[in-house]
Image: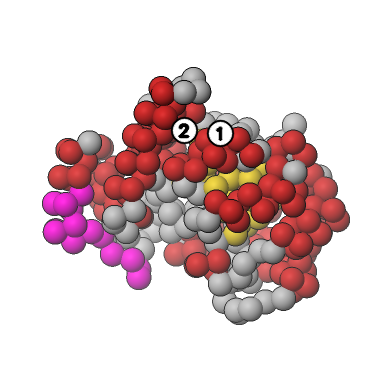
Amino acid sequence: MTKAKRGIYAAAVSPFDADGTLNTAKLIAYCKHLMSDGGCDGVAPTGTTGEGTSVSMRDRLALPAAFAEAGMPTDSVIFGTGAPAAGDCVELTRAAVDAGFVNVLVLPPYYYKNASDDGLYSYFANLVEKIGDDRLRVYLYHFPQMSQAPLSTNLVKRLRADFGAVIAGLKDSSGDFEQSRAFVEATGGVTEDFDIYPSSEAMLWDGLSIGTAGIISGSTNAFANWVQKARKAPEGAERDAAMEEVRRRRSLAGKYPMMAGMKQIEAWRSGDDSWTRMAPPLVPLTAEQKTALKADLDAL
């Protein structure tokens, strides 16, 4: 079986050196923390929260081999490999597959807007055909607010019908639970071995109840242990209370720029202020935001 295991994933934030390059060793150590004390079942590096589109191609291409050398579990890592250029997406995906990481999260090409379903189909079909490896597992990435290239249910069904298990699932970052429901209804969700991941842990049990596979979230960089507690709580008052704590933390995270906020929390946890570095054009939290975030965390 090559598909990534289901559960709670963090869209892992990325540490940068002073010259703007990705600090691969620090990212690996951080992902190991996330999958142990951090409470995550897996990690999704170089996604949106990981500023993946701002990481250089050189750094992104080298990352999967470094993860393999470090002994990272291949069933718990879903690399972001989407790119505006179809050829870059292929090369990033090939680097992951060659290193044994066959699960990839793929944004549609996000420069040209209002692309047709046929155009988007050709992008994903090109990827599958160029990789030419039955082990490949593609998770489609629906994030219309950022990509301006929404994935329709008809497109998802067409890709699944034509490429079978290689089209393994979808991350729905629309923030709209009804959109996640529509994807489940169109594909059958986990019942048909199609793994849909909403992007907010506030949707955890609503999603699991209709056939989603878990969560891939930016705020689980800091709060995954609370999500696991809610996931394991028995139905009833205990689960309701646990989910209320999850929603409180997700709401807190939503008050601040997600990437900068999660990096600031990691800087405090680790005692390493270099975690607050951002890739342009993003910037760290302001002094006022840091003070407010600290107060909100203390209040929890």
SS state under label 2: loop
Considering depth in this image, is 194 or 175 the residue closer to the camera? 175
SS state under label 1: strand
Q: Quadrant of the N terminus?
A: top right
Q: Quadrant of residue 260?
A: bottom left
- Measure the alpha-carbon separation of dots 1 and 2: 8 Å
User: What residue did someone put label 2 on?
Assistant: 40
The answer to whether marks 1 and 2 mark residues whose Cβ atoms lie closer than 8 Å is yes
Locate residue 119 relative to residue 74 in the image: left or right. Answer: right
User: What amino acid is found at the position of numbered circle 2 in the picture?
Assistant: Cys
Considering depth in this image, is 11 or 69 the residue closer to the camera? 11
Considering depth in this image, is 78 or 92 the residue closer to the camera? 78
Residue sticking out furthest to the front: 237
Considering depth in this image, is 91 or 81 the residue closer to the camera? 81
Q: Quadrant of the C terminus?
A: top left
User: What residue did someone put label 1 on?
Assistant: 7
Residue 67 can be seen, yes or no: no
Position in image of residue 5 (x %, y %)? 63, 33
Count residues near mark 1 (Cα–Cα under 10 Å), then give few for <14, some for 14-19, many for 20+: some
Sequence-first tag of 1 and 2: 1
Q: Is residue 250 magenta?
A: no
Residue 231 can be seen, yes or no: yes
| Disc ID at residue 255 | none
Position in image of residue 103 (x %, y %)? 65, 44
Q: Which residues are magenta?
A: 280-293
Position above or below: 60 against 234: below
Locate residue 150 relative to residue 135 in the image: left or right. Answer: left
Position in image of residue 209 (x %, y %)? 60, 35
Position in image of residue 175 (x %, y %)? 50, 55
Position above or below: 254 against 239: below
**Residue shown at the point (25%, 60%) measured from the top left:** 284
